[in-house]
Amino acid sequence: MNFLELFGRNLRRGPYTEPFPFAPAAPAPKRLRGRIVFDARICEGCLLCEKLCPSGAIRFARAPEGMTFDCWHPTCVFCGTCEFYCPTKAIHQTNDWSLAHLEAEKFALAEHGLIPSIVCAECGGKGLDTAPNVSKIRPPLSAEELAQLRARCPKCRNKFLRTRGKAS
Ligand code: SF4
Ligand code: SF4
């Protein structure tokens, strides 16, 4: 097929590429590594994701209202390391690839989260409303015990687990 024939055929058939952004994009494959999302309610606050992120896209910081989480998508290389090592899947990747934005919108587009501060139900000290790390505790905690544990600071959580089930 010579060039003119090829040109005529392509004119008749139309473009082979997606017309995006002039039309909605085709659905992305389910396993595409895209935008990071964070769920503060199930985060244990272990900071593993921040330590392991190869591009330094994840930042936890102490603030008066608790511990803030930020993930900067322009810095993220979508490697999936954070999701792979997160013990609770509080951080995970979606297949959302549509991250183009104006410079002025960069802060709004970053993923933000907050683990709120708490006042310890036992000692009145400061703590964070992190999900308790109880995966290896046997027998497993009931929902009521989990709520009691979560309302405590780290020191009182340890004490709670040490004395759990023992008569007072
Ligand atoms: S998101 Fe996961 S890995 Fe990161 S601090 Fe929370 S529990 Fe740890
Ligand atoms: S996907 Fe990779 S680069 Fe992006 S935030 Fe997670 S660990 Fe960092």
Image (cartoon, grey):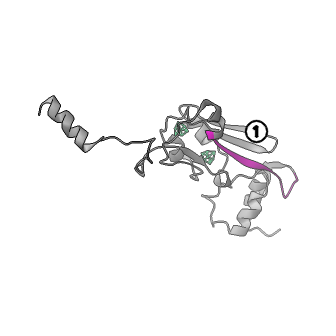
- Furthest residue in direction left, as rendered: 1
Q: Is residue 120 left or right of residue 95?
A: right
Residue 33 x/y as whole percent: 46, 44
Q: Which residues are magenta?
A: 109-124
- Furthest residue in direction right, as rendered: 124
Estimate how packed mark 1 is, as few (under 14), some (14 to 19) or many (20 or more) residues with alpha carbons within 10 Å: few
Secondary structure category for the residue under label 1: strand
Residue 107 x/y as whole percent: 66, 36
Camera-side residue of 27 and 156: 27
Q: Is residue 79 left or right of residue 154?
A: left
- The quarter of the picture where the C terminus appears is bottom right
Quarter-wise, where is residue 62 in the image? Answer: top right
**Does the stretch in magenta take in 138?**
no
Residue 110, visible in the rendered structure: no
Residue 46, visible in the rendered structure: yes
Q: Is residue 122 above or below residue 94?
A: below
Camera-side residue of 19 and 163: 19
Query: Which residue is rendered at x = 59% and y = 41% of the image?
Result: 49
Number of numbered discs visible in the structure rendering: 1
In the picture of the structure, the residue carrying the numbered disc 1 is 62
Residue 164 x/y as whole percent: 74, 64
Camera-side residue of 154 and 5: 5
Query: Which residue is rendered at x = 23% and y = 42% of the image?
Result: 12
Q: Is mark 1 within 8 Å of ligand 1?
A: no
Query: Which residue is rendered at x = 25% and y = 38% of the image?
Result: 11
**Does the stretch in magenta take in 121?**
yes
- The quarter of the picture where the N terminus appears is top left
Q: Amino acid at mark 1?
A: Arg
Residue 68 x/y as whole percent: 71, 42
